[in-house]
Image: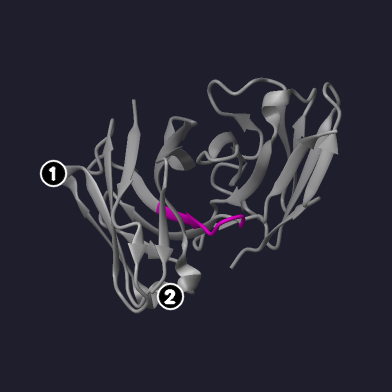
Amino acid sequence: QITLKESGPTLVKPTQTLTLTCTFSGFSLSTSGMGVGWIRQPPGKALEWLALIYWDDDKRYSPSLKSRLTITKDTSKNQVVLTMTNIDPVDTATYYCTHRGIRVLYSSSWDGPFDYWGQGILVTVSS
Amino acid sequence: DIVMTQSPDSLAVSLGERTTINCKSSQRVLYSSNNKNYLAWYQQKAGQPPKLLIYWASTRESGVPDRFSGSGSGTDFTLTISSLQAEDVAVYYCQQYYSTPLTFGGGTKVEIK
């Protein structure tokens, strides 16, 4: 059973750095094909993908936020950390940690969608 | 970036009626190596995280009721709820996972008429 849980501050001041931790269980991020992503959702708005880290430490970022984001993993702790610098009130959102698994087809493994999500953490940016 | 456009933004449907949500991608999301469209549908109920319903445009995730179905190919996709139930009230999102940046549609809110 795969579970993910986000943790971190719920109130951050503008210009500060936000650090969020995703602690997961039920899979290993050292297993070929596995990935963990971060997605956010401002109140009442749509989902926005932020970053993704794969089992082989391949990292992908949203181009619009790439200069502000860093994603890392600690396989031994089953954790993924997302850091966002120079926080602004527009960054107020619920931040979700997600599992990107694989799907098997024709005896081969292929990138899958986000099949497991954490409950999310609401981060408010305000002075 | 692949832009995902959903329509309508919202709709109100009577219980038991058929519901159709459309999603259009600005580029094809068909992966030639396996002939699959990398298009997923999610359901998000109020106060909850999104839940995966459909992947590869038409494959139902395990445990998802069969009244949910996905169709389409190339750049045009559809999510259909064959007979709307009260528990289907939610916002529905499409997403392409063909290439990064991974992108979502703006969402379609489904309510009961």
* Quarter that holds the C terminus of chain B: top right
In whole angstroms, how far apart are the C-alphas of marks 2 and 1? 32 Å
Counting from the top left corner in percent of width and height, residue B49 is at 50, 41
Q: Amino acid at mark 1?
A: Ser
- Can you say whether A115 is above or below A22 in the image? above
Residue A88's mark? 2
Residue at the left extreme? A76
Chain under numbered label 2: A
Q: Which residue is mark 1?
A: A76
Pick the residue in front: A29 or A20. A20
**Residue at the spot x=38%, y=63% of the render?**
A60
Write the start and end of the magenta stretch as one range: A38-45
Q: Is residue A109 visible?
A: no
Q: Quadrant of residue A86?
A: bottom left
Amino acid under disc 2? Asp
Q: Label 1: state its secondary structure.
A: helix
Residue placed at 81% from the left, 38% from the top? B20
Q: Position of residue B82 (x, y in %)?
A: 79, 25
Asked whether residue A120 appears in the rendered view, the answer is: yes
* Residue A58 in the figure: left or right of residue B38: left
Magenta span contains residue B99: no
Q: In front here: A14 or A40?
A: A14
Which of the marked residues, 2 or 1, is nearer the chain's N terminus?
1
Q: Chain of mark 1?
A: A
From this view, report whether residue A125 is shown above or below residue B54.
Answer: below
